[in-house]
Amino acid sequence: MNFQFQDLNEMLLMGGHGVYVWAAVLVSLGTLIWLVVSPILQHKQTLKEIGLNLTREELRNQSGNKDI
Amino acid sequence: MNWTWFYRMGSPLWFYQSTSRWLPLLSLVTLVLLVAGLAWGLGFAPEDAKQGNSFRIIYLHVPASFLALAGYFLMATAGAIGLIWKMKLSYIVMKCAAPIGAALTFLALFTGAVWGKPTWGSYWVWDARITSMLILLFLYFGVLALQYAFHNQEAGNKASAVLALVGTVNIPIIYKSVDWWFTLHQPSTIKLTSAPSMHPDMFQPLLVMILAFYFFYALALILAVRVEILKRESKTTWVRELVEQASRQKIGAK
Amino acid sequence: MPESNRGFSAYFRRDLLLAYRRRGEVASPIIFFVMVATLIPLGITPEADSLKELAPGTIWVMALLATLLSAEGLFVSDYKDGSLEQLLISPNMLVMPIFGKVTAHWITTGLPLTLASPLIGLMLSLPSVAYLPMMAGLALGTGCLSFLAAIGAALTVSLQKGSLLLTLIVMPLYMPIIIFGSAVMQYSIDGMAWSGPLAILGAMLAVAIALCPLAIAAVLRLITIN
């Protein structure tokens, strides 16, 4: 198993097909990263929201005030 | 036979806790496989004699197509389990599998189009495989649209589960007929992939990439399911405890 | 099975009668069919040679859209006036009434389309050898279309704006039918034996008759009774 290109620059060019190959790679990686990052962000957001709701509820219980 | 494991698996709490334990390892394995497979495929696999370097797109196109189709079957199976055993978790899995599958189908189409340009001289060719992928994308869209059209979550779950099942019955028919249709209209001279005749040096990185995509799919699905579980179970004590624990940790860190 | 037969014929006759009372509405898919056929020469070319090439595909696409247009109402009025719920809670088999309803739908859309298709064939300069295969294919194919559209109609019955969604979810399922339907015509134009694709259409119809009413019954039960 050998590295197929002379250097990284040549790997970038891919004998004239670089645009296609790297476009495919970039879009694929972008999609894959988005599929992982977006649920992680949503996870954080959801935890925060539930936490806020909890604190609000606690405050309401302490003061007995329903308006908060 | 003891069936308690089956019902335990249907419990969102069980799923959330056990995936918390496995997520770091799963992410690591996925990352290693993806990086290794991509580097192998893009840099070390030999060049294709006919297509040159553009054939390297295969290392993304084929795994994405695999998972797009497998994802549809997984979604339909989850829907069927939901319909039969009325498991909460399986509907959540079904709902979360739809956008991931649609994204992978889109990816298969995109990589196919980009591959088609240097190979056939055009981004879009009505090739049997690509056309089937397009129809698969439409099937995903249908399930997604139906899911979101219902305000009543229960009814939406059931409806999209049935639609996914109807789609599953249809997929083999669609594939066969598109294949047949393709042979009717002068097949193109270059076939994109012919796996059995591939050289092992080219084939091995492909296997690594397919495995990597399977792991990735599991990872993405689990992450999405965990969010959905939190949202649906936000009123339960275990979620409250989890949130309190998280906020305490945050304060401790500060 | 006299009991199940009654379920079939009762709903079959009832839906036909309802359709007869709304004759104007029933005619609209046919008018749609003819109108779109007028658009093709206007939009592309009036040249007979080109039209002949386009005719098989065009006729099938139009037939598909026409059945979709009319499918939305299949269960909606029954759902709104409560007779669907009555049907669902009645102890009788649900499959036969549904079979009856879908058959009535085919009689009021697929059959008239089939009968009107020679007119479209004339307008699109279809070669005369293709008329018989076209009608045979349409007769079988529109049956499949009706059954599949009925699944979509059942899935979207409780939604306010179901018609576009119905189109979206049913259209991918139509692809095999359109492939073999237009192939029947293409084969006959090319002078080949067209019984092969026609037989496949027939097989698909048989499968649709066997499975679709079951699926529709399950959907209606699941969605309307919560």
Image: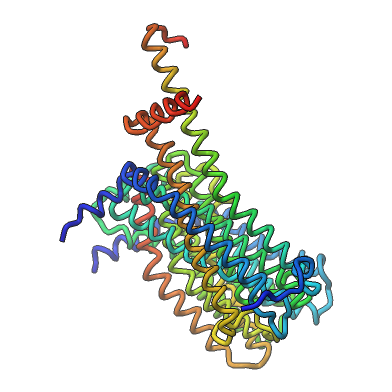
Q: Nearer the viewer, residue B173 or B62?
A: B62
Q: Nearer the viewer, residue C195 or B202?
A: B202
- Quarter location, residue C203: bottom left
Q: Is C131 situated left or right of B28 in this image?
A: right
Q: Position of residue B16 (x, y in %)?
A: 37, 44
Q: Residue at point 57% right, 67% down?
A: B37
Q: Position of residue C150 (x, y in %)?
A: 46, 59
> Vertical placement of B70 versus C137: above or below?
above
Q: Residue at point 62% right, 57% down?
A: C28
Q: Residue at point 58% right, 53% down?
A: C25
Q: Residue at point 66% right, 60% down?
A: C32
Q: Nearer the viewer, residue B180 or B208?
A: B208
Number of on-image labels: 0
Looking at the image, what colour scheme do you see? rainbow
Q: Is residue C18 visible?
A: no
Q: Position of residue A19 (x, y in %)?
A: 78, 65
Quarter of the image that includes the N terminus of chain A: bottom right
Q: Residue furthest left?
A: B1
- Quarter location, residue C192: bottom right
> Vertical placement of C48 versus B21: above or below?
below
